[in-house]
């Protein structure tokens, strides 16, 4: 189950499909296992890191939508809202 969660990026429905079980079963097993909870948290952090990396690349490439998103979420203190 841990491997399926990692492969699915922590998306329980996708992990369940890989395993041929329901999302509810995955949810119950994760809820009852500190090890699986830790794995899910680690995968989530990895995906966030990946998303931040892609956002930085988009900003560097001059993607105006990415620039605006970043400023609205990270530069509120400078008046970007």
Image (cartoon, rainbow, N blue to C red):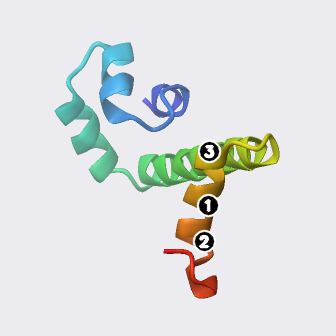
- The residues bearing labels 1 and 3 have C-alpha atoms spaced at a distance of 12 Å
User: Toward the viewer: 51 or 45?
Assistant: 51
Q: Which residue is mark 2?
A: 74
Q: Which residue is mark 3?
A: 51
At numbered mark 3, what does the secondary structure look like: helix, strand or loop? helix
Say above or below: 56 vs 8: below
Say above or below: 21 vs 68: above
Q: Position of residue 39 (x, y in %)?
A: 52, 47
Residue 67 is drawn in which quadrant? Answer: bottom right
Mark 1 or 3, nearer chain start? 3
The answer to whether the residues at label 3 and label 2 have Cβ atoms under 8 Å apart is no
Q: Which residue is mark 1?
A: 70
Please report the residue visible at 72 percent of the width from the left and 42 percent of the height from the top.
58
Q: Which mark is residue 55?
A: none
- The residues bearing labels 3 and 2 have C-alpha atoms spaced at a distance of 15 Å
**Which of pointers 3 and 2 indicates the residue nearer the eye?**
2
Q: Position of residue 78 (x, y in %)?
A: 64, 84
Q: Position of residue 17 (x, y in %)?
A: 32, 16
Q: Is residue 54 left or right of residue 60?
A: left
Q: Tally the numbered discs.
A: 3
| Label 3: few (<14), some (14–19) or many (≥20) C-alpha neighbours in 10 Å | few
Please report the residue visible at 55 percent of the width from the left and 57 percent of the height from the top.
69
User: Toward the viewer: 45 or 65?
Assistant: 65
The answer to whether the residues at label 2 and label 1 have Cβ atoms under 8 Å apart is yes
* The N terminus: image quadrant: top left
Please report the residue visible at 57 percent of the width from the left and 83 percent of the height from the top.
79
- The residues bearing labels 2 and 1 have C-alpha atoms spaced at a distance of 6 Å
Please report the residue visible at 56 percent of the width from the left and 75 percent of the height from the top.
80
Q: Is residue 76 left or right of residue 21?
A: right
User: Toward the viewer: 21 or 9?
Assistant: 9
């Amino acid at each position: 189950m841990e491997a399926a969660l990692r492969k699915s990026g922590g998306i329980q429905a996708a992990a369940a499909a890989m395993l041929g079980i329901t999302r509810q079963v995955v949810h119950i097993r994760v809820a009852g296992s500190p090890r699986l909870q830790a794995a899910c948290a680690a995968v989530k952090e990895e995906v966030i890191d990946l998303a931040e990396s892609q956002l930085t690349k988009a900003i560097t490439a001059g993607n105006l939508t990415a620039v605006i998103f970043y400023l609205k979420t990270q530069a509120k203190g400078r008046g970007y809202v």
